[in-house]
């Protein structure tokens, strides 16, 4: 059955492609690993792609709201998500029972009783926090005048913590959270493979467990 409609899949992969391009151009701008993706337009491409990503993320959130899928990622579900994570953790190390897949579709009602693996809720909010930090610091570096308040905050936090403030501290935070994001994306992709969700986010369909 169809798990993710074309709108979700299209936005998901646009966000992914934007993220890959931002990571590659960001590594080039930072002079990391000797990477060179674009000759002379890395900085401009990085900024334009970043702005495009912000717009796409806004459209994605709007899509989740109008389709009602936002309910699966609500803050109120975090405690449930944590309990499921603990159960998964115990099962992984053999100190607890096997955790059954919680996704269930009710064909009679034509709706899901549970649509996501509960730990996805935690991952979603990790994405939100990391993403906001990256976006704010990125905008501050690209538009320092308009985001002068961020520089004031960077001075207030940076000098006591790291002995530097302003642009240097903002750039360091931006880079740190970029690496954190890459790590979360890798774990996210691994989980999608384990729970057989890659097909659904690519082609839309998945064989879902049903309510008996």
Image: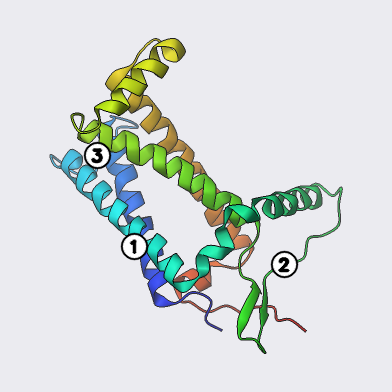
Q: Nearer the viewer, residue 157 or 51?
A: 157
Q: Is residue 105 above or below residue 90?
A: below
Q: What number is the disc on residue 59?
A: 1
Of the 4 image quadrants, the one containing the C terminus is bottom right
The spot of residue 114 in percent (x, y) is 66, 70
Pointer 2 with pointer 1, Cβ within 8 A: no
The one of 35 and 66 positioned closer to us in this rendering: 66
Residue denoted by label 2: 101
What SS does tag 2 mark?
loop
x and y percentages locating residue 89 in the rendered image: 75, 48
Left or right: 129 in relation to 54:
right
Residue occupying image coordinates x 72% and y 67%: 101
Q: Residue lying furthest bottom in this view? A: 108
Render colour scheme: rainbow
Q: Earlier in the sequence, mark 1 or mark 3?
A: 3
Q: Is residue 102 above or below residue 143?
A: below
Asked if residue 186 lies left or right of residue 49, the reply is right
| Residue shown at the point (40%, 42%) measured from the top left | 132
Q: Which callout, 2 or 1, points to the residue nearer the camera?
A: 1
Say which of 40 and 173 sits in front: 173
Q: Which residue is disc 3 drawn over?
A: 36
Few, some or many residues within 10 Å of mark 3 (<14, 14–19, 20+): some
Mark 2 or 3, closer to the camera: 2
């Amino acid at each position: 059955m169809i798990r993710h409609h074309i709108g979700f899949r299209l936005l998901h992969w646009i966000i992914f492609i934007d993220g890959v391009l931002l990571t590659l151009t960001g590594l080039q701008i930072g002079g990391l690993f000797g990477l060179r993706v674009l000759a002379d337009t890395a900085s401009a491409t990085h900024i334009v792609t970043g702005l495009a990503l912000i717009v796409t993320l806004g459209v994605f959130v709007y899509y989740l709201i109008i389709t009602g899928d936002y309910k699966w990622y609500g803050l109120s579900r975090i405690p449930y998500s944590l309990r499921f994570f603990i159960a998964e953790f115990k099962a992984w190390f053999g100190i607890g029972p096997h955790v059954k897949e919680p996704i269930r579709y009710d064909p009679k009602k034509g709706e899901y009783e549970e649509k996501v693996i509960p730990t996805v809720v935690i991952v979603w909010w990790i994405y939100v926090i990391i993403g906001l930090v990256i976006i704010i610091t990125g905008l501050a570096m690209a538009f320092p005048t308009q985001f002068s308040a961020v520089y004031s905050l960077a001075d207030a936090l940076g000098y006591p913590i790291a002995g530097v403030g302003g642009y240097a501290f903002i750039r360091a935070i931006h880079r740190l959270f970029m690496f954190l994001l890459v790590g979360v994306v890798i774990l996210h992709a691994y989980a999608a493979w384990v729970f057989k969700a890659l097909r659904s986010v690519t082609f839309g369909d998945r064989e879902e467990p049903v309510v008996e």
